[in-house]
Each structure stands twice: as C-alpha cells, then as structure tokens.
Image: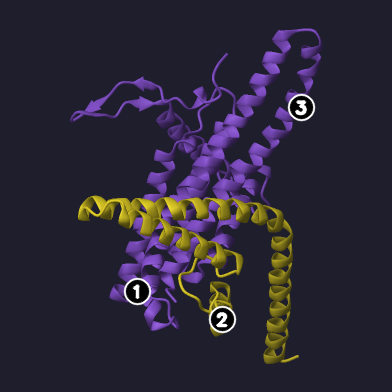
Chain colours: A purple, B yellow
Amino acid sequence: MHSPVEQFTIKSLLALELFGFDISFSNSALFMMLSVLVSVTYLTMAMRRREIVPGRLQASAEMFYEFISEMVKSNVGSEGRPFFPFIFTLFIFLLFGNMLGLIPYSYTFTSQIVVTFVLAAFIFVGVTLVALIKHGMHFFSFFVPPGAPKVLVPFLIIIEVISYFVRPVSLSVRLFANMLAGHTMLKVFAGLAVMLTSAGGVFAAGSVLPFLALIGLTGLEVLVAGLQAYVFTILTCMYLNDALHLH
Amino acid sequence: MTDDESLTALQQRIKTADDARKNAGKKADNRAKLPAEAMALVGRIATEMVAGVAVGGFIGWLLDSWLGTSPLLMIVFFFLGAGAGMMNIWRMATGHGLKIGYFDHQKDTPADDDEQDRTRD
C-alpha cells in the first residue's frame, strides 16, 4: 500500500549539477514543461485556421482569451493592458499544470510550496517594482492609512507593512494547500476503496461507497484546479491594480 | 435623408447595440461568477488569517535574531501579524479588495475608470 503523500515525492529523472548545485531534471520540472508544451500546442492548433465563425477548438481558445481579457479590464482597468500577456500566460500555465496533475500517474507541480512561492515572489517583486517605477517615493505613502489618529499611525504602518508582506505568502499557500489537500484526499479515498476490496466479503461490497465518493471528489478537484488557477490570477490582477492606482 | 441625419441615426444604433452588449455581458458575468467567487472568498479568508500570523511571527523572529531580544519581538509581531491578517479579512469582506487603507473605494474602482475612459473617447 502506498502512502497518500507518496505522490508528492520529487524524483530525479536526469541527474544534473551546476557549480555544486543540484539542478536535476525532476518529475516536477517535466510536468512544468509538459504544461507549457500542451498549452502552447493547444493554443497554436486552436488558432491555426483563424476563422471568422470559430470552430469548437478556436471558440474554446477565444473563450480563455476573453475570460482573462475581461478579468484584466475589470480588475486593473485600461492601464492593465500591457500586462495582459503575462496574466494570460500565468493563468494558462497554472490551469494546465493543475489539470494535468489530475491525470492518474502524473505529477502536480503546484502541490509544491517551492514552486508556488517562487511564482508568488516574482509577482510580488514585479508588482512592487511597477509601483515604484510608476509612483516613485510616493509608493511608500501606500502604507500610511489616511485619516487615522496620529497616535496610531506608527502602529498602523507596521500592520500595513506586514499585511503587504503577507501577500506572496497567502498567494502561494492558497494554491499549494488546495492542491496538496485535494490530491491527498483523493489518494486516501482511493486507498480505502482498494483496502476494502482486498478485505473481501461484506467489506468488498462496502468499497462501493468510497469509490462513489472518489468519483464525486474527482469532479470537485477539477473545479478546484480551475478555481485556484483563477484565484491566483485574479489576485495578481488585484495586486497589479493596487500598484498602478495606489490610492 | 441627408448625410448628417443618417450619421446621427447610425451613431444612435451603434450606441444602443453597444449598451445592449455591455449589459448582456454584465448579466452573464454575474451569473457565472457567483458560486465560484464565493468559494474563492472562503479559501482566501482562511489562508489570509494563517498567513498573517505566520509572516508576523517570522518578521519578529528575524528581528529578534538580529537585535538579540528573543523572544520579545516575536511575540509582539505575532499579534501584529494576527492584526494584519484580520485587517485583510475585514477589507476583503467589506468589499475593499486588498487595497491598503480605509477609503471609500466605491468611488475609484477600476471599472469606473474604464467607463470614464470610454466616455472621454
């Protein structure tokens, strides 16, 4: 019997070393590349014919485009337009990563905090740089809540700074925890079904229950995979909006 | 019908079509987004609370190991972090999004900016 968390083990597929650092090509890296490869292939194939009345494939690709375009427009406004390619890439990368992870025997790279935290950290640094470039030193006024009593201001600045630094953490933890918990739960229910079947007799008949639950949970995980990619992207949009229009 | 009249009529028709399209989009969006956004909000509240405390504690621990005041600052920042987390949740729940500060954000939502841009054009 495999442990429910065994699916998260990083396996080195091709041992590599650079300046004493282990940069082995792992199953996590393989699925990141697959996510990129599958999404690029899908979008290229879908947009190959460019018909005015789109076919099914083209319509689905256009749906993704319009979904993100609308998200950027309603959350960031017209100034967010230059960032659209980045936001779109981020969403598609995460969505395909999450979805590919649901295929049996595959690996979910978003279930590793390192992966999600690096993504979130880059977004955090990037968004802060955008704000600094656009507003200069005025950016720091962001941390001074206007209209607060003078006595409380230093105290509130600390809280605001902490709540600013919470952003990359909550952004990455949310995605990672959802994927980790979901995949562990699927494995626990699957394991239960297998155990009951191998116990035989009445227990084998009872294994139908966890199996039914597993079907439902798989559906739920598909929803979570899409939803968490969406949440990650929409929060990036919100942070970007804050950076572009301070207050 | 003069050219001017037909142009005005055309403009009117474009405007009506444009408005209809915009409103249709809004309605469809609301319907599609509601359950997913509610679920997303629940998840965000939970993580925001944990992340606030964790980040606060970590900053306190860093300052402690730098200033050698262990464990005083860690305790102080633990509670400040909890406060920051709570404030984030409050802002989220009251529809202020993640903006820092306490304004009436109804006035300057980006959607409105966009709307103004369009009318200015």
Q: Image quadrant for the C terminus of chain A?
A: bottom left
How would you rate the neighbour count of disc 2 (Cα within 10 Å): few for under 14, some for 14-19, many for 20 or more? few
> Could you tell me how far apart the alpha carbons at marks 1 and 3 are, in whole angstroms?
56 Å
The mark tally for this picture is 3
How would you rate the neighbour count of disc 1 (Cα within 10 Å): few for under 14, some for 14-19, many for 20 or more? few
Secondary structure, mark 2, is loop
Residue plotted at (57% across, 67% down)? A74
- Which disc number belongs to residue B107? 2
Secondary structure, mark 3, is helix
> Could you tell me how far apart the alpha carbons at marks 3 and 2 are, in whole angstroms?
49 Å
Chain letter for the residue marked with disc 1 in the picture: A
Chain letter for the residue marked with disc 3 in the picture: A
Instruction: List the residue tagged with mark 1.
Output: A154
Q: Position of residue A168 (x, y in %)?
A: 42, 53
Q: Amino acid at mark 3?
A: Leu
Residue B17 location, quadrant: bottom right
Question: Which circle's residue, 1 or 3, is located before the other in the chain?
Answer: 1
Image position of A69 (left or right of A215): left
Of A246 and A40, nearer the camera is: A246
Q: Amino acid at mark 2?
A: Lys
Q: Position of residue B117 (x, y in %)?
A: 53, 79
Q: Image quadrant for the N terminus of chain A?
A: top right
Q: Position of residue B34 (x, y in %)?
A: 70, 58
Residue plotted at (69% across, 88% down)? B8
- Which disc number belongs to residue A212? 3
> Could you tell me how far apart the alpha carbons at marks 1 and 2 are, in whole angstroms?
27 Å
Residue B33 location, quadrant: bottom right
Q: Amino acid at mark 1?
A: Pro
Camera sees residue A123: no
Residue plotted at (55% across, 32% down)? A101
Select label 1 or label 3 by which is in front: 1
Select label 1 or label 2 by which is in front: 1
